[in-house]
Amino acid sequence: MQDDSNPSARKPSEIGRRTLFTAVAAGGAVSLANALSASAQTGPAQAASREMLKPRTAPTGAPSAAAMQAETAPPPASEVFEARSGSDYMVDVIKALDLGYVATLPGSSFRGLHESLIDYGGNAKPELLTCLHEEISVAFAHGYAKIAGKPMGVFLHSVVGLQHASMAIYNAWCDRVPIVMFVGNTLDSAKRREGIEWYHTALDNGAIVRDFVKWDAQPTSLEDFNEALLRAYGLAVTQPAAPVLISVDTELQEAPIPVGKRPVPRLTLPTQPVGDPAALAKAAAMLAKAEHPVIVVDRMVRTPEGMAHLVELAETLQCPVIDKRGRLNMPSSHYLNQSENARGLIKSADVILGLELTDPWGVVNTLLDRIERVERHTAAPGVKLITLSTHDLLIHSNFQDFERYQPSDLAITGDAEATAPYLIEAVKQALPKGQQAAMQARSDKFRAAHADTRRRAYEEAAYGWDASPVTTARLCAEIWPLIKDSDWAFVGANSSFQSFWPQKLWDFDKPYQYAGGSGGAGLGYGAPAAVGAALAHREHGRLVVNIQGDGELMCAPGSLWTAVHHKIPLLTVMHNNRAYHQEMMHIQRMADRHERGVASAHIGTAIDSPFIDYSKLADSMGMWAAGPITDPNELGAALKKAIDVVKRGEPALVDVVCQPR
Amino acid sequence: MKAALTAASALAVLSLSAAATAQPPPPHAEDAVHGHQLFMADGCYQCHGTVGQGGSAAPRIAPDPLPAEAIAAYIRKPAGQMPPYSPKVLNDADIADIHAYLATIRKPDVDVGKRLGGGRN
């Protein structure tokens, strides 16, 4: 890269405009004249400009020759070339972050940055990825970050692109996922071209999304950009993680890099927050004394080490774990994963340890969806609740994603994954001696319960086996034998829409095999997040499967194109129930409440007349596709063909007409 | 959904004694056909599945459905998250026909565990 610290190494045309801006900002005509005299530009137009910009005094007689020349000469010519602009410098800073990729739908407010990334930056580390909607760009980065363990960058067009992206940003905020976003803007009104550039400018772009980003900044110099971006990255990845936004002025992007040595970007990443040792000792004592402890975990595990620590904690206590599946926390094949028996365990628990819960109130209470919403306590009276979480470190006022307030007997602030090793040690010290028999009894009980859960799952999956539309159990049962011997991963939206059949029938034992849902339950996440996750899996050669809801796909169908365009291998299996099924149930509920019958509940909720042919949709974007499949006995063969395509490194889609859930 | 599951389980226990003493007569074919139509038209399948297999929104209700009286009682006054259906929407005869349909459903002869290659450890 070019050495920016030596002005003499720069071409003359690099100096003029930016130096001019700096001088003006520094204090007027005298500084400006000095700046101009320092410039190496000596052409007639520039000389005339200097003359015109000299402080004027009242005329005292005949104009000088220089003044005459200035008055009669043609207007100064604009500079037409510059070797490097501020956006090149921005790319240098971005490269220091190891972002890997930047997702974008192009927009003129960041054209400088876009061009610098692909040409000056060589379109590598980060590589630009083309998306067909800003909601896709952000959801794509959302899915990627949860698998890659690091953020992706996103370039957004000022105002309009950012507003398109806002729903996906909200999802990432609710899901506590880091994304580093850049939005263009033209701060100086005198530099905006007439018309559209005014529509695409905001006094404060950050205000659009400030309620659901962790931090935003609008730097006014390249040095400011440098510091803002490094600060933003560190904030984004520190738990609780969240998206951050940097507004990038178009003039800052497009003006030449100013003279002077700038600091070399150096990123300092903070450690993750760990819980107070005294509080951990207290928690350990409560857990060690408990007869029926239960661990409820939601969004804890990010790494294999985190999963291993959760397993160790559970085994040390012989304590059942209820995985709320905000992430894949506890291996589904481990006998202490008792997620399918949550109700009974919560009811009988004397101590509950909540790890990174998004909704502690909902763990021990429920609210019935009636005319009068009835509150029910689902835990035993006197149950002790311990929480270990960073949840309350990042809540804002407007959006209510923080859920209902739940008093705890011990609330420990700290990142559960980072704190787990210390909690394990505290528990080992707190456990009384001579507990082997009691521990063995617990172990035997939960092994039996786990085996029984498996047996029941197989039995339940058989019901409706030959039904058409295809049951979600059959769908998942057909997929599993085709992927289980590969290094596989399941991506996309929350699997509650498939009645959690993947978790019931497949062996999830690595944290990357599932990454939870959207966070904010905003439609449009599943398909692009699946493609983003598949991109992160690609370098590991994993076989990646997304079971994709039909209504959600149509919020972001262009995701399929991005998968094809960037050669991202991913099997998309359509869970095509031809409706916004959740909403159809809500309309039925209202119709029943009013005793009007449910005959009209399909209006506004069904996706029919015509049915959408998703295989044709995928085919139109160059993707291998099959379906719609209505006969469950045809499913296995179609899936096998599709997986062969995916194993060759391409995406594929199989459209399956399914039961609602 | 979970509340509905519990209610259904409780109902099953309560109705066991009645079921043990009086076997229901076999459903008439025409009633079952009508019941199937109602099951689809009245949206029962949205939560329970087209063959009553259940899912995350509602429990399995077939094969071997609860006695018709128990189902009717639950539909009128569900204990969990299921919305109540009034007689204006679903009369007693319709409920009986839906029950007749559910009673025709048989468990498929398939060993899912075997098909999945032993499944989990």
Image (cartoon, helix red, strand yellow):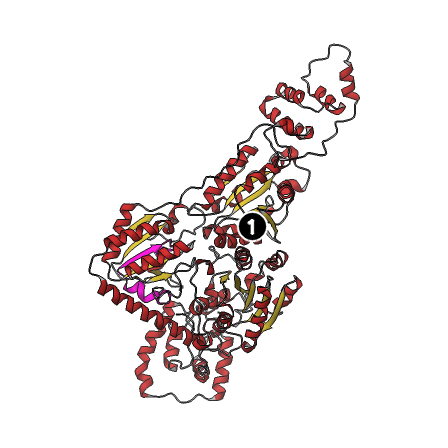
Q: Is residue A492 above or below residue A117?
A: below
Whole-percent x, y for residue B60 in the image: 42, 75
Crowding at dot 1, Cα within 10 Å, few <14 / some 14-19 / many 20+, comes out as many
Residue position marked by numbered label 1 in the rendering: A165
Seen at 63% across and 69% down, the residue is: A610
Q: Is residue A177 magenta?
A: no
- Magenta region: which residues? A338-361
Q: Quadrant of residue A37?
A: top right
Name the image quarter holding the N terminus of chain A. top right
Q: Residue type at mark 1?
A: Ala
- Chain letter for mark 1, please: A
User: In the drawing, does residue A447 fall left or right of residue A9?
Assistant: left
User: In the drawing, does residue B44 fall left or right of residue A412?
Assistant: right
Q: Is residue A340 magenta?
A: yes
Whole-percent x, y for residue A86 in the image: 61, 35
As drawn, the residue found furthest toward the top would be A60
Whole-percent x, y for residue A152 in the image: 53, 49
Whole-percent x, y for residue A530 in the image: 53, 59
Can residue B80 be seen in the rendering of this structure?
no
User: In the drawing, does residue A74 fall left or right of residue B98?
Assistant: right
